[in-house]
Image (spheres, rainbow, N blue to C red):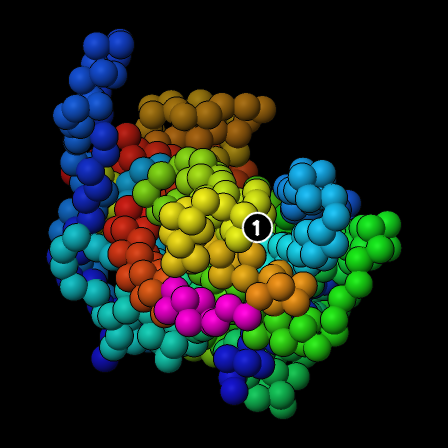
């Protein structure tokens, strides 16, 4: 209960904090939608008669906006400038602050990106089956958790290296290639498709978008497994990282 | 009963080193060399509840490292530390709610877009302060720190002095029992620094908090700390009253006199201007010299002074303690 209250308060704080940086958030929105838009244009050109391609990519844009994570800019910077010490001395788990900021940024991105999604949908005359959209909700939530855990895990490398942006950038490229943004994974060669389905990246983007677009009936199994795996790995890496931070200081 | 207990505390870092040039750079890719830096070496002291102690030393002496260990940010490589009967680096919630670490270089953490009142409200939630206690403490802090005009301001828009006042308010709103103050007056003007000193003094008087304070400003130390712990090269060089340190380091006192005569025969002249003389006299000869001066000369005014604290401490930093 106390954790929920603290998280709620932190979320409110962060929403307020980021309200002053709407122009910066707009640049993040643009960065987030560019890759799915390229995918949309390329694959719509390849399959001009398939309306599900446009529907899928509009869903990918929305899922991307709702699940973007920037812990390499937020949390890692706290390690670099030493302000993580402030967080360590607060009587609450540090991750509450990280999650609060993550949710606030996502809320702003979704709000600011909604007109882009709407305009793209109208321009391409995309129609959604709202029962499919509703059915995709738990998939989107799991995707949001997965993207956060993955980005946070990579951001934790800031305890060891000052090149965290390169590390997270590499992780983002994997998500782009194997998550269903570069190409819907159904269009990949068989072997690649099977590999992509098993890896966590598909659950971060492609799967919830496919469900929302009414294209697939995939299960949440892999998403759930990867959430458990990443929670364990993040916990272990966090403990080792904090031990290192408290051994050498900021 | 002690509030802070430090025994044989040691802290060492492994810092990577290499010689200059491309060859050494390539070599370090295969085999990295490290040098061990001993930040703290067998530091021991205790602080009783309610005591205010000054923790001084030159830059790089180990003051902030010690503060970080005592507050729980750093994990030492050796020794034992107990603060309020807890091991700080375990950072248990119950412990964190009883201490505060305020750094003059970073007085206020967290969201800078928030107003001061929002930030204080967050502290209330974080530290489980009951609303009536919160209101009462806030009223006290408003009066002591002149907070009222700042409550509706955003943190990012505060001046350095205001940030320090707000930082102290945020740290003290939950009434910590042990307060670690790291350079609380750094960068502040004379009035703001004096305001902070007065506040710390009143807070200690009201709450009986234990304070460990580091500062390079001797005015902070002289006005707040009856006890001084001097650390250098990671070792405690002195632990005791300020006056004793002064006596130990400077076997002289200063006699300041106003006279039209020439008192050079009575001691070493340190300063001379418009009939004002400052003589340096061995401590054990002060009484006799003063008597002889008054008998031999027409003295308008006379005062016996301790040498300036800055000079005493500077001497300790440069030459060490004898």
In the depicted view, which residue is nearer to us: A214 or A159?
A214
Q: For residue A222, what is the image quadrant?
A: bottom left
Q: Name the residue rendered at 46%, 25% in the picture.
A: B271
Q: Residue at x 17, y 53 (%)?
A: B77
The image shows residue A121, relative to residue A221, as above or below, that is: above
Q: Position of residue B40 (x, y in %)?
A: 20, 47
Residue A221 inside the magenta-drawn segment: yes
Q: Quadrant of the C terminus of chain B?
A: top left
For label 1, the SS is: loop
Quadrant of res B139: bottom right
Task: Indicate whether A76 appears above or below A103.
Answer: above
Where's residue B128, x and y in %? 52, 83
For this view, does B109 lie left or right of residue A128? left
In the rendered structure, which segment of residues is drawn in magenta? A217-226
In the picture of the structure, the residue carrying the numbered disc 1 is A184
Q: In which quarter of the image is residue B246?
A: top left
Mark 1 chain: A
Residue B144 in picture, x, y percent from top left = 64, 69
Q: Foreground residue, A72 or A52? A: A52
Q: What residue is shown at x 25% (from left), y 77% (from top)?
A: B85
């Amino acid at each position: 209960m106390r954790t929920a209250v603290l998280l709620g308060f932190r979320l409110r704080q962060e929403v307020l904090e980021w309200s002053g940086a709407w122009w910066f958030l707009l640049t993040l929105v643009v960065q987030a939608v560019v890759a799915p838009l390229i995918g949309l244009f390329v694959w719509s050109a390849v399959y001009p008669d398939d309306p599900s391609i446009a529907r899928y990519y509009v869903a990918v844009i929305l899922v991307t906006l709702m699940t973007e994570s920037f812990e390499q800019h937020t949390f890692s910077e706290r390690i670099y400038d030493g302000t993580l010490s402030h967080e360590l001395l607060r009587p609450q788990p540090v991750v509450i602050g990280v999650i609060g900021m993550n949710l606030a940024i996502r809320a702003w991105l979704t709000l600011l990106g909604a007109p882009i999604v709407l305009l793209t949908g109208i321009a391409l005359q995309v129609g959604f089956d709202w029962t499919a959209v509703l059915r995709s909700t738990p998939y989107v939530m799991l995707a949001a958790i997965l993207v956060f855990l993955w980005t946070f895990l990579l951001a934790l490398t800031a305890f060891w290296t000052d090149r965290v942006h390169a590390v997270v950038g590499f992780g983002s490229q994997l998500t782009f290639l194997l998550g269903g943004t570069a190409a819907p994974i159904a269009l990949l060669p068989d072997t690649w498709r099977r590999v992509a389905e098993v890896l966590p990246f598909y659950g971060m983007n492609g799967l919830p978008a496919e469900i929302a677009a009414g294209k697939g009936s995939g299960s949440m199994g892999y998403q759930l497994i990867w959430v458990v795996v990443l929670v364990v790995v993040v916990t272990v890496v966090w403990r080792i990282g904090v031990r290192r931070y408290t051994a050498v200081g900021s | 009963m002690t509030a802070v207990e430090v025994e044989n505390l040691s802290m060492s870092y492994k810092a990577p080193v290499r010689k200059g040039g491309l060859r050494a750079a390539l070599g370090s890719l295969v085999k990295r060399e490290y040098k061990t830096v001993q930040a703290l070496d067998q530091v021991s002291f205790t602080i009783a509840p309610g005591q205010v102690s000054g923790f001084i030393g030159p830059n790089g002496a180990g003051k902030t490292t010690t503060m970080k260990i005592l507050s729980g940010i750093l994990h030492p490589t050796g020794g034992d530390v107990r603060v309020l009967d807890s091991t700080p680096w375990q950072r248990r919630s119950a412990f964190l709610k009883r201490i505060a670490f305020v750094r003059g270089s970073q007085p206020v953490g967290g969201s800078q877009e928030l107003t001061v009142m929002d930030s204080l409200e967050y502290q209330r939630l974080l530290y489980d302060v009951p609303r009536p206690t919160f209101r009462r403490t806030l009223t006290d802090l408003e009066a002591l720190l002149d907070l009222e005009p700042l409550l509706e301001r955003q943190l990012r828009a505060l001046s350095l002095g205001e940030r320090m006042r707000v930082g102290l308010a945020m740290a003290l709103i939950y009434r910590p029992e042990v307060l670690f103050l790291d350079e609380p007056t750094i960068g502040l003007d004379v009035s703001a620094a004096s305001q902070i000193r007065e506040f710390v003094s009143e807070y200690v008087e009201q709450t009986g908090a234990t304070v460990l304070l580091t500062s390079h400003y001797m005015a902070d130390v002289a006005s707040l700390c009856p006890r001084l712990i001097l650390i250098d090269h990671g070792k405690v060089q002195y632990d005791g009253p300020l006056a004793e340190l002064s006596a130990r380091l400077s076997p002289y006192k200063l006699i300041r006199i106003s006279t039209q005569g020439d008192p050079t025969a009575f001691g070493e002249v340190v300063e001379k201007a418009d009939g004002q003389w400052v003589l340096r006299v061995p401590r054990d000869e002060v009484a006799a010299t003063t008597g002889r001066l008054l008998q031999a000369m027409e003295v308008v005014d006379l005062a016996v002074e301790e040498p300036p604290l800055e000079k005493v401490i500077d001497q300790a930093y440069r030459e060490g303690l004898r």
